[in-house]
Amino acid sequence: MSHQEEFIDKYKADFINSCKGTHLFPSVVAAQACLETGYGKHIFNNNMFGVKGYGKPNQYWKGAVSIGSTIEYVNDEKKDYKLAFRCYDTVLDSIMDHNRLINKSPIYELARQATTPEAQCNALQSSGYATAPTYAKILIWIINTYHLKKLDNGNA
């Protein structure tokens, strides 16, 4: 089993269970975690999705932040930034907070309305979830390469 498959296998039940009762596809959440962490190589302060450190604390995030480096795209130009990122007690808290954010924020309404994982990836990108111009394309590649749609059927 590859490092990538081990990462997916380790968290697949969390991806599936965290999406129950939501409009999120576990395959998309898993692909986002794969991309954002380099398949688990870069999980800082249990933050699997690079969620920025602003907003009100909630049941999953107690308000702690740390400053970290990130790459953002502004007008298709790649730039390095130092930003505040949320710190979580557990990786599961990060997954749950990420899903809460997507499920509650009005800007992700189109992502919640998506009827396929591919449409959800495209909707996340178009609503500004990530600044990388190829974000959706990479998520879809990860979904297809690692057969993540099986997670959408609850296959852990």
Image (cartoon, rainbow, N blue to C red):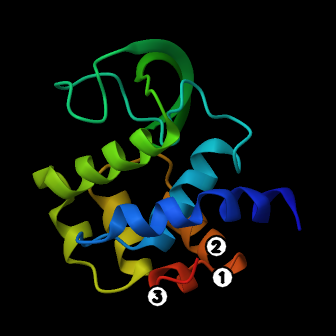
List x then y, in percent, for residue 115: 29, 86
In percent of width and height, residue 106 lies at 10, 53
Residue at the outermost right position: 1
- Depicted 12 relative to depicted 34: above or below: below
- Counting other residues with Cα less than 10 Å from the Cα at mark 2, is it few (<14), some (14-19), or many (20 or more)? few
Q: Pointer 3: residues within 10 angstroms few (<14), some, or many (20+)?
A: few
> CA–CA distance between discs 3 and 2?
19 Å
Query: Type of residue at label 2?
Result: Trp
Asked which secondary structure carries label 2, the reply is: helix
Q: Which residue is mark 1?
A: 147
132 or 60, which is in the foreground?
60
Mark toward the viewer: 3 or 2: 3
Can residue 134 be seen in this snapshot?
A: no
Amino acid type at image mark 1: His
Taking the spot 48% from the left edge, 42% from the top edge, the residue there is: 49
Question: Between residues 135 and 57, which one lies in front from this camera angle?
Answer: 57
Label 2 or label 1, whichever lies nearer to me, is 1
Residue marked by disc 2:
141
Rounded to the nearest angstrom, the CA distance separating label 2 from label 1 is 10 Å
Q: Nearer the viewer, residue 68 or 78?
A: 68
Q: Write down the quadrant of residue 138 in the picture.
A: bottom right
Work out whether mark 2 precedes mark 1 in sequence or the reverse, and give the earlier one: 2
Q: Of marks 3 and 2, which one's residue comes earlier in the chain?
A: 2
- In the image: residue 59, left or right of residue 7: left
Quadrant into which the N terminus falls? bottom right
Give the residue number, with chain letter if any, for mark 3. Answer: 153
**Which quarter of the image is occupied by the C terminus?**
bottom right
